[in-house]
Each structure stands twice: as C-alpha cells, then as structure tokens.
Amino acid sequence: MPKMMRAVQVSKPGGAFELVERELPEPASGQIRIQVEACGICHSDALVKFGAYPGLSLPRIPGHEIAGRVEKVGANVTEWKKGDRVGVGWHGGHCFVCNACRKGLFINCERQQITGISYDGGYAEYVMVPHEAAARIPEKLDAAEAAPLLCAGITTYSPLHHWGVGPGQKVGIVGLGGLGHMGVKIAAALGAHVVLFTTSPDKTADALRLGASEVVVSKDAAAMQKHAGSFDFILDTVSAVHDLNAYLELLKLDATLTQVGAPPQPVPLSVFGLIFKRRRLAGSAIGGIRETQEMLDFCAEHGLTADVEVIRIQEINAAFERLKKGDVKYRFVIDMASLR
Amino acid sequence: MPKMMRAVQVSKPGGAFELVERELPEPASGQIRIQVEACGICHSDALVKFGAYPGLSLPRIPGHEIAGRVEKVGANVTEWKKGDRVGVGWHGGHCFVCNACRKGLFINCERQQITGISYDGGYAEYVMVPHEAAARIPEKLDAAEAAPLLCAGITTYSPLHHWGVGPGQKVGIVGLGGLGHMGVKIAAALGAHVVLFTTSPDKTADALRLGASEVVVSKDAAAMQKHAGSFDFILDTVSAVHDLNAYLELLKLDATLTQVGAPPQPVPLSVFGLIFKRRRLAGSAIGGIRETQEMLDFCAEHGLTADVEVIRIQEINAAFERLKKGDVKYRFVIDMASLR
C-alpha cells in the first residue's frame, strides 16, 4: 500500500476545490519533499480553478505561496536537509541552459515549470519540488505570515530592488491589495517616501499604518496633478484595466513605472507621456530565487511579513468567493494543520 | 532704416507659407546671429503651419534643422565667432535652473524654448538663437545633408546611444522615413546588426543600401514570429497609431523598445508583453546639445549624413503637400541661397 496524503485539488474547469487523498510522492534525484505548514491563496490560483493556464492539465493541486519544512530529500540534494525551514513560490523548475537561466534569472527560464500549475502545489500536506525552487525562511518569521512573501512579497520586492528604490526617493504604490500592501511595507523599509494610490478613500488609515507617508485618491484629478513629474519610481499592482497615463505623468525625468498587475485586456497608452521626459514603462514578473532569498532575509531583518487572514482548509471555497470581491486584508493563508 | 532679411512665414493657422521681408534681428547678450545655408523640413513644422502648438503665436518663421555660419555675435558670447560652421535644432533656449538643466539635459528643460516655434526659426536668410543652442558642424559635412542631423539625426542617435547600442547587438528600426533612415545608418555605424521593419516591401532595397542587414515586412506575422524574443533594442520611429505589442514580443529579456514617433491617439498596450521578460517601453525626445555635438562628430567620422532632396524656397508649399503623402527620400532641405 502506498503512503497517502490529504490535499485539495481542482478536477474540472470552474469546479469547486475538492478534499482528496493522493499518493505521497517520493523524491527523485534533485527533489525535496516539504511538509507544508501554510500556503497562501494568490489571485492567480484562479487560473487553476478555471483551467485557464495554457497547457494546464487537471486534476491539479494549486498553491505557490508555500511555507514548510523539508521532510525528505532525494539523491544529489546537497543544499537541504530534513527539518530545514523553506519556502517555495511560482518558480518551480528550470532548464538551466536557456539565456535567462545562464544569467541566473531562473524566474525568466524559457522552459520554466510553475509550482501548483505545471505540477501539484501547496494546498496539501506535502509538496515535492526541485531543490533549486526552495529558499530558506528565517526561523523568526511565522509560517502563515511568511507564506505570501514567496509570491506577493517577491513580486513587489523584485522591481523595487531592481530599479534601485532607496532612501530619499519618492515612490508610488498603486493599489492596496495582496501585492500593494507588501509594496508599501517593503518600499517604506527600503527608506523611500511612500505614496499610496487607491480608488478607495477608506483605505487611507490602513495605508498609513502599513508605512505610507501619503495617500492619494486616484479619482481626484487635482490631488493627482499636485504630484506631476515628482516620482522617482512607481509600482503599479492593479490588474484591472485602468489609466496608466495618469501615473506616467507623475514620473520625473528618466523615471520608471513598473507594472506587476496584469490587466487582461490592452490598456490605452499615450506615447507622449513617455517621450517628453524620457520616461519608462516596464513589466516585472515575480522574481528569481536568489532575490527571493534576499527578500526573505530583508523581511526577517526588518520584521516584515504579510497581513494575513488564516483559514482552515475546509473554508477554501468560501475564501475564494470573498477573494473575488476583494474582501480580504490582505491575504488568505491556509493553515495546513487543518488538513491533518 | 532697419536692415531687412528675406524669410518664409506662416501668418494664419493652415495658411500657405508666405515669402516676406522681416527686420534683421540684432543679437542681444548671449545671442548669435546665423546666416542660414540650409534648413530641413521636419514633419513637426506642420505644428506651426496649422497653429497647433500650445502657446504658439503667429506670424512665425518655422524651421529647426538649421545649418549655417555664425555671422554676428552679441555680448558675452565666448564659444562662437563670426564664420563658425554651426547647426541649431529643436532646443532653442533653456532656463539653466530646473532639475533637467542642472543635470545638463537642456533638451528636457521645463521652460524650454523651441527654435521656429517659441521664436522665429530657420526658413530665413538669418536666424538668431541663444549661444547654448548651437553645435559645431564639422566642415567636411555638406550643409544641406547635415541640416537634418540637427533633428532627425539626434532624435535617433540619442536613444541608440542612451540605451547602449553597439557591436554584437541585434537592433530593430521601425519605419523608414526621415527618422528611420537615420536610425538605420546610425545603428549600423554603431556596429549593430540592423533589422528594418516596414509595411512597404518596396523599401527593402533602399533599407539594405542604407545599412540594414535584414528587412522584415511587419504585416507578415510569420516573418515577425521568427524574430520573437531576439532583439537587444528596438527604435520605433512611426508616428501613426500602430501595434506596439507585436514589437514588444520581439525583445529579449530586459530589453527596451524606445518610441520616438508620437502617435496622436493612445495605442493599445498589452501589459503581459512587458511583464514576462521584464521588458521596457520608453520614450525619447530629440536629444541634448552635448549629445548633438557628439552625434555630429560621430557622423563626420563615419561619413554619415541624411539622404536629402534639396529644394528652392519657392517650392516649399509643394514640398509640404508631397511630405503629407510621404513622398520624399528622406528629407526635404531648403537651399537658402534661393532666398537671396
């Protein structure tokens, strides 16, 4: 009889998450098996729920904001041993030979595998990943609060770090959701003067608590105009179609707006806004494993974690309904003890 | 009786260019008077013809692609003397105290004056400009062929230089007009492997003659797809609304597409194209005077000039009609001897 584990899977597009028993996978060479302590619920897990990711095959166990401990290692695993506290994010496997891998940018691997999409993810008692997909979570961080760092944390840390955000800079964060709330915390910890842009005035108090120095309601054209041409960097976390041009106008000469939210339809872009101050619009996806480790260490040093609402696995379908309405501050995290 | 000069002016929005006599301006402190040898006709001169530039007052003498010789200098002019070969482009006056000026980026001056828009330009026997607006044109360059370097030349050289185009790189130039033909020449002279993108297959032979190594007809989706993810840099010179996303898909990881053509309406931008390879979309406007001098010296060293069709001043209205249809290879230049 094979050993079994409990997990939550999606078996048909749009179907509910189902609690199932699955065979416990055995680590092959270069793989590690992690006992999952906590797994965050990312918006992009909906890509699994609705069978919407290209090449996805169902059934699939979602989940790529994983915090846990190494429970068993396969052959040729040198970096990890049983009991190590680790996290796993989106980047779940790499070819090591493409141009991006050779630059050490595994996250941009041309043949990348994605945790919880290409193979079974973290909504389970155990998850098995290639050893290079794990980063060390400092012991001082709580597992549930650390789990979202592996996706929401690195997705905001990576562009803030890549474009050199630091002390003395004025930095905008657009949107205060799972990504935005981490963007505010990290940009503030990096020493920037942080301005949070939101369509909801009732998010003001929370933004200030999280580390913003100012809050601008983006629907208020006069309030926006006051900041014209004054930002060193803007990180836009909004994935709905919205007016990028209004934010581009707020950038200084040679400054960059980086989009990490991905609106599903094309957005109208006014090229003039880019031309006259040699501004830049860039994209950024998640972040590599080296940067993920750096981010985890940075968060431990500064006492940063995600603001989470911990749920039991039995509440997952209800949580997804609330997520659709944006009703969470700021990340649902599943406590995997509830599976056992 | 004041001394007079002959010139061409626009006196009402949409009106024809009129040959007139104007008072010869006397250089004040810090100004130089240039005897114009040749002046290029830039598409943006239409902003004067149609009275479309914010704050423009008519009558106005257009022209910002000026090649000539210093004929008289005002007080406190140390850099220039009578007889010096100089050129003047878009950047016609600067405040020296704004953030951009203090970085030496006069072209981005927040209070910039524009030659031929803020004050009278180069469609005249003489033009008067602030001394900092002139660059030295090497004697070996022909005046008519050099004049368009002051706008079309620097507008393409500046982004190619700023984003580090050089040997071993694969560089795309989109569009083969006044800007594009200089982009091809300069990128090739910088050592890049140049691919010209055009909607007109009949431009192929000319593009190869100008220095392109390959020509891709952008309407051919299969030909475009062959180049996916392979470009180090793309310079887009097209000012009509067109599909930027198709070009963004051709960029490598971390590579930049810079737009120097300015479509009048917003263009649809797919953010996914930026996110997955951390690509960048930037704008660039003309280029500063320091870079203009560098570009002129580079062009002299490499024997580069614009391909021009020299006209007499009396042909200017007909030339503008042809320009609207794109019927010029690749720049009209007015020979100012025809004014005298």
Image (spheres, coloured by chain):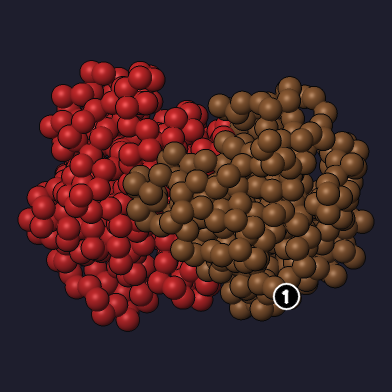
Chain colours: A brown, B red
The residue shown at (27%, 33%) is B196
Residue A37 vs B194, above or below: the answer is below
Q: Chain of mark 1?
A: A
The residue shown at (55%, 47%) is A27
Residue B200 vs B241, above or below: the answer is above
Residue A317 vs A252, above or below: the answer is above
The residue shown at (18%, 45%) is B188
Q: Quadrant of residue A250?
A: bottom right
Give the residue pinned by disc 1: A140
Q: Specify the quadrant that holds the N terminus of chain A.
A: top right
x and y, in percent, of residue B112 in the image = 48, 62
x and y, in percent, of residue A227 in the image = 70, 63
Residue B218 showing in the rendered view: yes
Residue A234 showing in the rendered view: no
Left or right placement of residue B111 versus residue A340 in this view: left
The residue shown at (38%, 49%) is A96
